[in-house]
């Protein structure tokens, strides 16, 4: 705990100077060398969205009768998104803080509608039927909302959901089935048409997670890409999540949840009158909500228009084609599946540790995102190909080729073997054992929390060697240290 509230005021200049240096150790995303986390429309759109954000920062969407400007912004953003994905007349939606909140709300609407339809409503426990590539946000939603998860294997070669397996998993307790367009891990689109038909035949709601692609895929299609149907043109699709802070290129804090009809949304909403204060009726998880993100998204969508998004899509599409060709030419690397958009994952074919490759890329100034293995799916590196840096494709591929060669010579597996043997057979992870593991892994404790070693391969390999539940237990303990106050 290093900072206390100061007794006296601090000058604006001093604070601003300090804030400006605060990002110095963040990944340097503006230079285009960060190939995950970043959705950059370029400086022009960024400048406008920031002005719009600040203009509405203080407007509170908690009470749309007091702040009709927020209501109008929300309705207009939802309307633009809904029409973009062919939502029928009568479709409705809400503006949320991000994909996770949109997904939590889709699950809440489905869960409560399912419960309301049953006579044993208070005791019955609903489930979600998910391809195992569906985003972790669905697991989080199930955890928060007390639903079970049926995590269904995907095709091990294409990474797409398998309709017959989803069909087998749906039962009388299923409140929601899910497909992604595309899924994050490998960037492929699930067979939405077949999945939605199966769910609909069983009278189960079907959600399309378009957090990544809902906004961008229509432009990809207009540019001639072979994109299967994925939106409300498919009758069984009951809801969709679309992140505007991803490929809508709006600043962070912007997503929408759409429902085919107001009746389907009803259980998403929450009202409370059993307390002594003002009456609550909320359409989202948040109550007090800044209208800043809504205004920023509203401004970005209108400023760019289809013309601007098509241009961004074209750049991403061209760069992605070059990245794919370049990856295929690097001996020992293979793309996983056949990605449909600009996100992809690659792995090694000769056993070289992808975690060393990620470290070697970092040494050369590039940030890429390692993903752990899961079930039959190998550990890999995720790349999101950005729109702003086509000239960086060749240097990135050159760095990757060098990193792959360098990684091949590095030793692997020592820490993983030690961690597995330390943890082996222990029923739970107590604090003493956890601290022992941290020191083994080279994590240094400090007054302001732990510091990770600059090379993460050993730690990633150790996590990769553990079963998912043990990984989760370790990560929770680590995060509990990291947020040090
Ligand atoms: C397909 C998909 N769904 C949901 C999410 C969760 O979105 P957020 O991080 O905005 O909560 C993500 C995030 O990457 C995603 O890729």
Image (tube, rainbow, N blue to C red):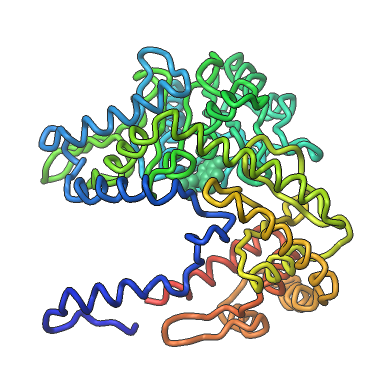
The answer to whether residue 139 is visible is no
Q: Which corner quadrant of the image does residue 225 belong to?
A: top right
243 to the left or right of 468: left
Q: Is residue 287 above or below residue 396?
A: above
Q: Which corner quadrant of the image does residue 305 belong to?
A: top left
Q: Residue at x 61, y 69 (%)?
A: 365
Q: Is residue 22 above or below residue 234?
A: below
Q: Nearer the viewer, residue 144 or 347?
A: 347
Q: In the rendered view of the protein, which quadrant contains the N terminus?
A: bottom left
Residue 60, position as x, y percentages in the image: 18, 45
Numbered disc total: 0
482 to the left or right of 389: left
The answer to whether residue 325 is visible is yes
Residue that lies at the very extreme toward the front in this rendered image: 391
Q: Residue at x 67, y 60 (%)?
A: 395
118 to the left or right of 349: left
Residue 317, position as x, y percentages in the image: 62, 38
Residue 399, position as x, y percentages in the image: 71, 64
Residue 48, position as x, y percentages in the image: 30, 46
Q: Residue at x 36, y 31 (%)?
A: 268
Q: Nearer the viewer, residue 289 or 58?
A: 58
């Amino acid at each position: 705990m290093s900072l206390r509230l100061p007794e006296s005021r601090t000058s604006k200049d001093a604070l601003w100077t300090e804030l400006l240096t605060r990002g110095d150790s963040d990944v340097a995303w503006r230079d285009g060398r960060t190939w995950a986390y970043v959705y950059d429309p370029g400086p022009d759109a960024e400048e406008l969205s920031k002005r719009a954000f600040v203009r509405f920062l203080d407007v509170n969407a908690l009470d749309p009768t007091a702040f009709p400007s927020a209501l109008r912004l929300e309705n207009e953003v939802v309307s633009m998104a809904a029409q973009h994905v062919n939502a029928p007349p009568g479709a409705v939606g809400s503006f949320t803080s991000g994909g996770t909140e949109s997904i939590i709300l889709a699950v809440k609407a489905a869960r409560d509608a399912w419960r309301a339809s049953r006579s044993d409503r208070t005791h019955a426990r609903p489930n979600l039927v998910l391809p195992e590539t569906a985003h972790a946000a669905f697991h989080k939603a199930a955890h928060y909302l007390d639903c079970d998860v049926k995590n269904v294997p995907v095709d091990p070669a294409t990474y797409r959901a398998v309709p017959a397996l989803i069909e087998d998993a749906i039962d009388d307790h299923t409140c929601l089935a899910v497909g992604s367009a595309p899924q994050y891990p490998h960037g492929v689109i699930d067979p939405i048409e077949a999945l939605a038909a199966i769910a609909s035949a069983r009278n189960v709601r079907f959600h399309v997670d378009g957090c990544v692609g809902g906004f961008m895929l229509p432009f990809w299609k207009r540019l001639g890409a072979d994109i299967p149907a994925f939106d409300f043109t498919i009758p069984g699709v009951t809801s969709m999540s679309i992140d505007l802070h991803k490929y809508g290129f709006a600043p962070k804090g912007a997503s929408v949840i759409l429902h085919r009809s107001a009746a389907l949304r009803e259980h998403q909403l929450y009202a409370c009158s059993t307390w002594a204060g003002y009456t609550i009726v909320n359409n989202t998880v948040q109550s007090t909500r800044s209208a800043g993100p809504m205004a920023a998204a509203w401004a970005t969508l209108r400023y760019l228009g289809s013309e601007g998004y098509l241009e961004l899509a074209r750049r991403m599409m061209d760069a992605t084609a070059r990245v794919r060709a370049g990856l295929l030419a690097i001996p020992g690397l293979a793309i996983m599946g056949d990605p449909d958009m600009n996100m992809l994952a690659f792995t090694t074919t000769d056993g070289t540790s992808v975690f060393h490759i990620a470290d070697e890329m970092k040494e050369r100034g590039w940030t890429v995102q390692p993903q752990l293995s899961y079930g039959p799916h190998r550990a890999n590196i995720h790349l999101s190909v950005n729109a702003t840096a086509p000239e960086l494709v060749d240097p990135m591929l050159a760095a990757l080729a060098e990193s792959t060669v360098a990684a091949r010579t590095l030793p692997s597996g020592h820490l993983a073997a030690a961690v597995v043997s330390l943890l082996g057979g222990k029923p739970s992870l107590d604090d003493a054992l956890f601290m022992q593991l941290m020191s083994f892994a080279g994590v240094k404790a400090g007054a302001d929390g732990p510091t990770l070693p600059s090379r993460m391969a050993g730690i990633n390999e150790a996590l990769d060697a553990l079963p998912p539940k043990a990984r989760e237990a370790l990560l929770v303990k680590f995060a509990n240290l990291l947020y040090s106050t």
